[in-house]
Amino acid sequence: MIEQLQTLDRELFLFLNNLGVKEWDWFWVLLTEKETSYPLYGILLILIYRKIKLKGLLITVLVVGLMITFTDQLANFFKDTFERLRPCNEPFIEYGRFLAKRCGKFGYFSGHAISSFAVATLVSNLLRPYYKYAFYWLFFWAFMVTYSRIYVGVHYPGDIITGASLGILTGYLFLKLHSYLKSRFDTVQ
């Protein structure tokens, strides 16, 4: 059963990875870099400040910082425990496209996927009462960032699906923490 899933994951990876078009490679390589999302984070901080004020913003920054630390450590723990090679380290990559600047050794599951979907879940729920399309835009962004990991050749679809699922769960758990801290320390509603 596990072997069948791995075969399916490889085949799906090669199919999705080979959908790439050379003229768009620059876009996906840029999108996969963490620094590319910094302007979005700045905009989100401004929107959060405008709607839930300074204490709410400080609570949000604290919770997001804790959440990103948690997601990074969880992803690294899984990578070191399962030791699943990334597609860019497999012999079949010659049939695919490797565009990333670097290729770590192990990749189960995607750190980009868990952190992107955790941020999208937490922040979209914070902004939903004020911006009705925040949910859709943030999940579209998270999907694009995670798909870029397949496009550049560093993650299997299974890595992405696992990371995204755990990211959504993590986002909701840290949303509960945010709600608790906000009700405890931010008395201005």
Image: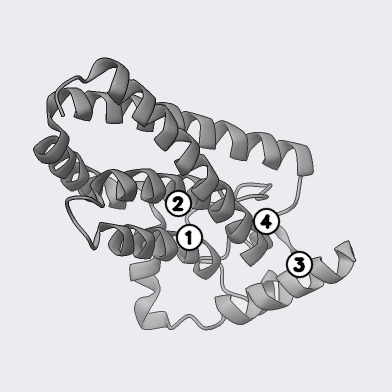
**Figure quadrant of residue 174:** top left
Contact? badges 2 and 3 (CB < 8 Å): no
Q: CA distance from mark 4 to mark 1?
A: 15 Å
Depth check, front residue: 32 or 47: 47
**Figure quadrant of residue 86:** bottom right
- Type of amino acid under label 1: Thr
Residue at the image point whose x is 47% and y is 29% from the top: 69
- Type of amino acid under label 4: Arg
Residue 108 on image: x %, y %: 68, 50
Depth check, front residue: 62 or 169: 169
Mark 2 or mark 4: which comes first in sequence?
Answer: 4
Mark 2 or mark 1: which comes first in sequence?
Answer: 2
Secondary element at tag 3: helix
Mark 3 or mark 1: which comes first in sequence?
Answer: 3
Q: Is residue 4 visible?
A: yes
How many residues crowd around disc 1 within 10 Å: few (fewer than 14), some, or many (20 or more)? Answer: many
What residue sits right under mark 4 in the picture? Answer: 86
Select label 2 or label 4 by which is in front: 2
Residue 62 on image: x %, y %: 33, 24
Secondary element at tag 1: helix
Q: Which mark is residue 91?
A: 3
What residue sits right under mark 1 in the picture? Answer: 146
